[in-house]
Amino acid sequence: MTRAKTPNFDPLEFRAALGQFATGVTVITTRTASGQPIGITASSFNSVSLDPPLVLWSLATKSASMPVFRANSHYVVNVLAASQLDLCRRFATIKGDRFAGVSHAAGDTGMPVLDGALAWFECHNRSRYDEGDHVIFVGEVERCGVREGAGPIAPLVFQAGGFHTLGPLE
Ligand SMILES: Cc1cc2nc3c(=O)[nH]c(=O)nc-3n(C[C@H](O)[C@H](O)[C@H](O)COP(=O)(O)O)c2cc1C
């Protein structure tokens, strides 16, 4: 296998190009060894496999939550609704207790499921891959669910550094 060429772009150009890819937004939650709920906002979520049911997301190596996510047996991927932009910001920025005042319930795995999430995936922490400045987490989904509502619920969408929601194309 040949080696990759040296990039001819700088990190800002790379980020700008990546940012064109519209994603949903998730909050990934788990618990510290003492049982305190923690979470981080992540847009790197994606599906991997239907059988077995696998998903992935990636976490910056410098993340303060890394030791907990590496060590824990389970975490939950909570898919945010457009009405949950405040949670997106809270779980990306607050340094202290991000769960203060955030309504949630323990899922079957005991990990926190956020009230109002569009969908959630309770994952076994199946494998981790160190790649560059991130760690790719592959989760094996043990439980999942979709929020019940009267009709479709608008998702939170992240693109080009801004927050959006979806409208029908035709
Ligand atoms: C929309 C959005 C998406 C993000 N996606 C990711 C991601 O996929 N992986 C990641 O490591 N950080 C991501 N972040 C940044 C983290 O949420 C942020 O750095 C957080 O403070 C990390 O928490 P910690 O350092 O306390 O663990 C994202 C932030 C925003 C606003």
Image (cartoon, rainbow, N blue to C red):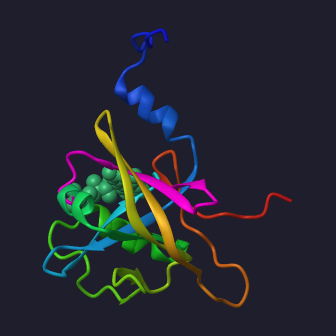
- Position in image of residue 115 (x %, y %): 44, 86
- Position in image of residue 68 (x %, y %): 20, 63
Q: Which residues are magenta?
A: 45-65
Can you tell which quarter of the image residue 113 is in?
A: bottom left
Q: Tell me the quadrant of the picture where the C terminus can be found.
A: bottom right
Based on the picture, tell me whether residue 62 belongs to the magenta stretch. Answer: yes
Q: How many marks?
A: 0
Q: In this view of the protein, which residue sits in the foreground, 20 or 68? A: 68
Can you tell which quarter of the image residue 148 is in?
A: bottom right
> Which residue is at the far front?
52
> Which residue is at the far right?
170
Name above or below for residue 120 compared with residue 14: below
Residue 96 placement, left or right of 57: left
Based on the picture, tell me whether residue 4 belongs to the magenta stretch. Answer: no
- In what quadrant does ligand 1 lie? bottom left
**Residue occupying image coordinates x 51% and y 32%:** 17
**Residue occupying image coordinates x 37% and y 67%:** 28
- Position in image of residue 72 (x %, y %): 26, 67
Q: In this view of the protein, which residue sits in the foreground, 66 or 158? A: 66
**Residue occupying image coordinates x 54% and y 66%:** 156
